[in-house]
Image (spheres, helix red, strand yellow):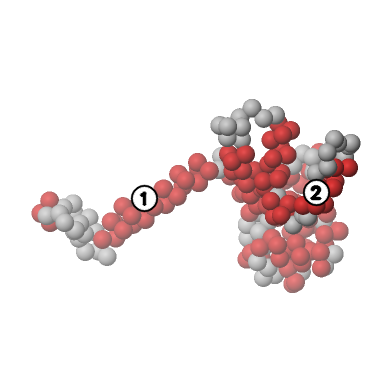
């Protein structure tokens, strides 16, 4: 790797005096990493990145090496409807300290991989009752990928439902169309006759469907 790098198809006498290590590390590896970072920055804004960093502090790998008390308290502030001010205060002053001490001293929590295993083990050991606020954070962290995927599906479906030919529909009509489009698997399982009968009995109609 310390040999001089000569690019293919170019005369050697005009080549830059760089090593193979420099070429693969700086010109290829660093460039690829920079492209990945730019892609992540365009997909995730500062708030989303901060949220993901806080969620990572719940990771039990390597005996909770990523644990950060301040970030977990900050994670609770992202959910004001789930955590009151008193909950956040109690979480930071008492529950998180007791939680991490318990997790690191109880043998059954050693060697866990991922927050899904952690949540299952907490329920099995009844620790979710001892640390209800921490367990609430775990549940919200587990719901985050599902909620994000659902929002992305909704925006993707909107491009099909509300197009140039149907751009004047009301919000209620568009919402009904989106539900039908997104939950098409559920609608396909319904019997057509049952739908017609329900629609027919909603009010008196001139003709029968």
Q: Secondary structure at mark 1?
A: helix
Q: Residue at x 79, y 40 (%)?
A: 81
Residue ID for mark 1: 31
Depth check, front residue: 180 or 18: 180
| Dot label at residue 195 | 2
The residue positioned 61% from the left and 32% from the top of the image is: 166
Image quadrant where residue 5 sits: bottom left
- Counting from the top left corner in percent of width and height, residue 12 is at 12, 56
Q: Is residue 104 visible?
A: no
> Mark 2 or mark 1, which has the lower sequence index?
1
Disc on res. 9: none
What separation in Å lies between label 2 and label 1 (alpha carbons)? 57 Å
Looking at the picture, does residue 145 appear above or below residue 89? below
Q: In the image shown, does 172 or 34 lie closer to the viewer?
A: 172
- The quadrant in which the N terminus is found is bottom left
| The quadrant where residue 159 appears | top right
């Amino acid at each position: 790797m310390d040999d001089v790098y000569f690019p293919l198809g170019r005369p050697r006498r005009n080549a830059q005096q760089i090593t193979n290590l420099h070429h693969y590390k700086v010109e290829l590896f660093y460039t690829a990493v920079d492209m990945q970072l730019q892609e992540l920055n365009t997909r995730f804004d500062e708030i989303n990145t901060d949220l993901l960093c806080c969620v990572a502090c719940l990771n039990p790998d390597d005996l909770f090496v990523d644990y950060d008390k301040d970030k977990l308290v900050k994670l609770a502030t992202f959910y004001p409807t789930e955590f009151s001010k008193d909950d956040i205060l109690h979480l930071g002053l008492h529950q998180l300290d007791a939680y991490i001490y318990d997790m690191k001293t109880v043998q059954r929590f050693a060697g866990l991989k991922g927050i899904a295993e952690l949540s299952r083990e907490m329920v099995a050991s009844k620790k979710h009752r001892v640390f209800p606020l921490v367990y609430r954070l775990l549940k919200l962290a587990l719901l985050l990928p599902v909620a994000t995927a659902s929002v992305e599906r909704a925006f993707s479906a909107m491009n099909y439902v509300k197009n140039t030919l149907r751009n004047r529909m009301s919000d209620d009509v568009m919402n009904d169309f989106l539900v039908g489009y997104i939950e098409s698997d559920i609608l396909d399982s319904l019997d057509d006759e049952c739908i017609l009968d329900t629609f027919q009995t909603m009010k008196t109609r001139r003709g029968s469907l």
